[in-house]
Amino acid sequence: MVLEEVGKLLLELEKAELEAPGGGATAQTYTQLLAVYLYQNDLCNAKFLWKRIPANVKSFSTELQQVWLVGQRMWQRDWAAVHTALNVEWSEDISSIMNALKVSVRDRAIHLISEAYSSLTLTTLATMTGLSVSDAQSAAVEKGWIIDGDMVEPKRIDKEQSMPHTNLTEDQLYKLTQFVSFLEN
């Protein structure tokens, strides 16, 4: 997903939650909002959202529970469990968000591995990235990492190469300005 699209979707979903009749939005709205927070790696807002979702909505929406399971595993930094939780069939409402989240989590894991490890096994690399061993080997070769038998020697990835440049949109700048203004008052 494009950063701009996610920002617009987030604003729409937050507005839908705030303006919901009777104070409770639909399960679909909560599910999409939770998925967007996870995609943005905004685990604090995801956790607060989960706390304010009415209990009856939580109990009757299995997909919402599944998205929250992903969030819990992200909070615990259990990357193997995150990938397991992400590998389910998602509805049309959130499949694009969850697929983008899967790619984002994998990219972050690869970047962290390049920063933190001087060597690791292919199996560990596969577990941390949610890839099969052969796909993990291919990803390592693609990154220019050295593979010696079952061991992988990662090279540091330039931040510019791994993380795309993100320009703040006007909506994001407005939201940030409002937040800073709120904190100052």
Image (cartoon, rainbow, N blue to C red):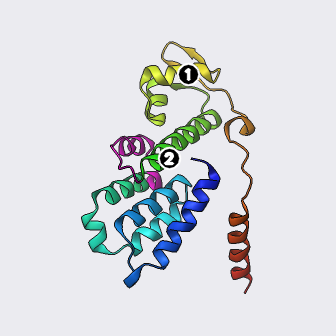
For mark 2, give the secondary structure.
Answer: helix
Residue underneath mark 2: 101
Specify the quadrant that holds the C terminus.
bottom right
> Residue 9 placed where, x, y %?
55, 60
| Left or right of residue 121, residue 119 in this image | right
Judge by depth and name the residue closer to the eye, 122 or 134: 134
Residue pictured at 63% horizontal, 24% vertical = 143
Residue pictured at 46% horizontal, 43% vertical = 99
Dot 2 crowding, Cα within 10 Å, few <14, some 14–19, many 20+: many
Q: Nearer the viewer, mark 2 or mark 1?
A: 2
Q: How many labels were placed on the picture?
A: 2
Residue pictured at 74% horizontal, 73% vertical = 177
Dot 1 crowding, Cα within 10 Å, few <14, some 14–19, many 20+: many
> Residue 53 placed where, x, y %?
38, 72
> Residue 126 placed where, x, y %?
45, 29
Image: 70 above or below 107: below
Q: Earlier in the sequence, mark 2 or mark 1?
A: 2
> Residue 87 placed where, x, y %?
36, 40
Question: Could you say which quadrant of the image residue 109 lies in?
Answer: top right
| Left or right of residue 89, residue 48 in this image | right
Image: 99 above or below 180: above
Residue underneath mark 1: 152
Question: Could you say which quadrant of the image residue 84 lies in?
Answer: top left
| Residue at the far top in the pictured view | 149
Amino acid carrying label 1: it is Val
Instruction: Residue 27: give its label.
Output: none
**Do callouts 2 and 1 mark residues in contact (Cβ within 8 Å)?**
no
Amino acid carrying label 2: it is Leu
**Could you tell me how far apart the alpha carbons at marks 2 and 1 are, in whole angstroms?**
25 Å
Residue pictured at 52% horizontal, 43% vertical = 105
What segment carries the magenta color? Answer: 74-93
Q: Is residue 181 magenta?
A: no
